[in-house]
C-alpha cells in the first residue's frame, strides 16, 4: 500500500517538474505582451500632416529636390570649417560666405519643388546607430546656415533674405515628409522652426501682418505636434532606461509589425536590434529570441527601407556608444 502511495507521489512530482519545464520553455519562446500604449489604435496610425505646413511656402513645381540637396551636402563636405565658423558669425562679406554660396543656392533651388527622395533611395545613409554619420548632419548644417544668412540679410536685402528663409523652410518640410528615420524627421521639424521664426519677423517688417499671423498659428501647431505626436512614441522606441524598455518591449514588437507610419517601424526595428544585446532583457529570454527572429525577418522585407533597418539591427554587435 505504502509502496503504491510512494510511487504515486513520485509520479506526481515528475508531472509537476515536467509542467514547470514546459512552462519555462514556453516562456522562453514568447515575447512580452504589449501595454495599453499600443492597444490604443491611434498610435499605430500614420502621422498626420502638421497643420498649416503646406501653406507656408508654395511647393507646387513638379520635381524632385534630391539632386539639388546633394549639391548642398557636397558644398558642406568641401567647406566644413567655413560653415562651422559661419554658425557664430555676423558677417556677410565674400571672405566669410563666398565658399557657402553654392550651398545656399542649392537650398533655394529646391524651394518650390513638390517632393524629395533623397534618403528613401539611400536608406543606409540615415538608418544606423550613430546619428553623427551619413549625409543628414551635413544637410542640416547647410539648412541652418541658410537660415542664418537670411537673418543677417533681413535689413540690407529683404528679398534675398526671404528667398533663403523659404528655401530652408522647404528643405525642412521635405525632410519631415520623407522621414526615412526619426533623425530625418526631427531635423526637418527643427529647420522649419528656425526658418519660420525669421519669416514671421521679415513678414512683419514688410507690413504683411496677415502672413505673420498665419505663420504664428503654424508655429504653435508645430510645437504642439512635436509634443503630442513625436515625443511619446520616440520615448518608447529610443529610451535605454531599463525601466522604460522592460515595460514597453511588447509594444516595440507591435510597432515594428503594425505601425502604419514607416518611420516608426524603422525606429522599432532598430530598438529590436538593441533588445537583442541588452543584458537586462536576459531575464526574459523570449524577448531576446523574438527580437533576433524579428530583425532577421525584417531584413528580408521587400521594402528596401524596412529591410535596411532589419539588416542594421541584425548586425549590431554592441550597444556601447549608441547615439
Image (cartoon, helix red, strand yellow):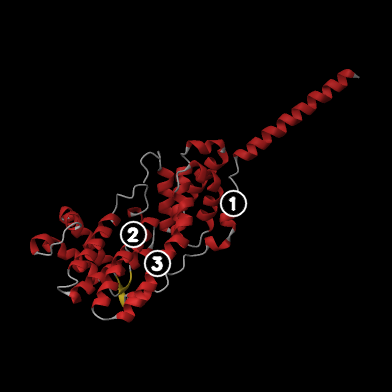
Residue where numbered disc 3 is placed: 222
Q: Is residue 23 left or right of residue 87?
A: right
Nearer-N-terminus badge (3/2): 2
Nearer-N-terminus badge (3/1): 1
Q: Is residue 319 left or right of residue 92?
A: right
Residue where numbered disc 1 is placed: 35
Q: CA distance from mark 3 to mark 1?
A: 28 Å
Residue where numbered disc 2 is placed: 187
Q: Position of residue 171 (x, y in %)?
A: 30, 67
Q: Is residue 42 visible?
A: yes
Q: Residue at x 22, y 70 (%)?
A: 164
- Can you tell which quarter of the image residue 85 is in? bottom left
- Can you tell which quarter of the image residue 69 is in? bottom left
Q: Residue at x 26, y 59 (%)?
A: 139
Q: Residue at x 17, y 70 (%)?
A: 153
Disc 2 secondary structure class: helix
Q: Position of residue 66 (x, y in %)?
A: 29, 66
Furthest residue toward right: 1
Q: CA distance from mark 3 to mark 2?
A: 13 Å
Front of the two marks 3 and 1: 3
Nearer-N-terminus badge (2/1): 1
Around disc 1, counting alpha carbons within 10 Å, would you say few (fewer than 14), some (14 to 19), or many (20 or more)? some
Amino acid at each position: 500500500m505504502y509502496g503504491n502511495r510512494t510511487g504515486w507521489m513520485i509520479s506526481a512530482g515528475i508531472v509537476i517538474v515536467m509542467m514547470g519545464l514546459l512552462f519555462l520553455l514556453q516562456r522562453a519562446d514568447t515575447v512580452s505582451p504589449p501595454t495599453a500604449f499600443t492597444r490604443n489604435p491611434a498610435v499605430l496610425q500614420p502621422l498626420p500632416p502638421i497643420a498649416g505646413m503646406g501653406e507656408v511656402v508654395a511647393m507646387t513645381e513638379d520635381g524632385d529636390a534630391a539632386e539639388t540637396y546633394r549639391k548642398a551636402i557636397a558644398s558642406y563636405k568641401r567647406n566644413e570649417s567655413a560653415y562651422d565658423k559661419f554658425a557664430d558669425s555676423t558677417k556677410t562679406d565674400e571672405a566669410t560666405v563666398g565658399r557657402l554660396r553654392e550651398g545656399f543656392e542649392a537650398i533655394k533651388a529646391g524651394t518650390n519643388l513638390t517632393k524629395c527622395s533623397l534618403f528613401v533611395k539611400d536608406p543606409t545613409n540615415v538608418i544606423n546607430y550613430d546619428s553623427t554619420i551619413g549625409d543628414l548632419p551635413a544637410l542640416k548644417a547647410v539648412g541652418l546656415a541658410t537660415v542664418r544668412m537670411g537673418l543677417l540679410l533681413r535689413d540690407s536685402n529683404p528679398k534675398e533674405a526671404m528667398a533663403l528663409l523659404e528655401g530652408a523652410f522647404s528643405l525642412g518640410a521635405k525632410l519631415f515628409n520623407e522621414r526615412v528615420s526619426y533623425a530625418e524627421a526631427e531635423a526637418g521639424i527643427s529647420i522649419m522652426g528656425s526658418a519660420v521664426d525669421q519669416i514671421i519677423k521679415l513678414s512683419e517688417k514688410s507690413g504683411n501682418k496677415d502672413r505673420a499671423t498665419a505663420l504664428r498659428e503654424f508655429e504653435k501647431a508645430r510645437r504642439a505636434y512635436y509634443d503630442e505626436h513625436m515625443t511619446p512614441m520616440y520615448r518608447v522606441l529610443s529610451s535605454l532606461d531599463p525601466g522604460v524598455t522592460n515595460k514597453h518591449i511588447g509594444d516595440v514588437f507591435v510597432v515594428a509589425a503594425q505601425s502604419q507610419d514607416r518611420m516608426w517601424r524603422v525606429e522599432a526595428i532598430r530598438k529590436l536590434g538593441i533588445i537583442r544585446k541588452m543584458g537586462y532583457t536576459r531575464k526574459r529570454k523570449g524577448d531576446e529570441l523574438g527580437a533576433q527572429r524579428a530583425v532577421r525577418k525584417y531584413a528580408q522585407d521587400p521594402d528596401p527601407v524596412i529591410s535596411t533597418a532589419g539588416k542594421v539591427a541584425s548586425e549590431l554587435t554592441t550597444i556601447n556608444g549608441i547615439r
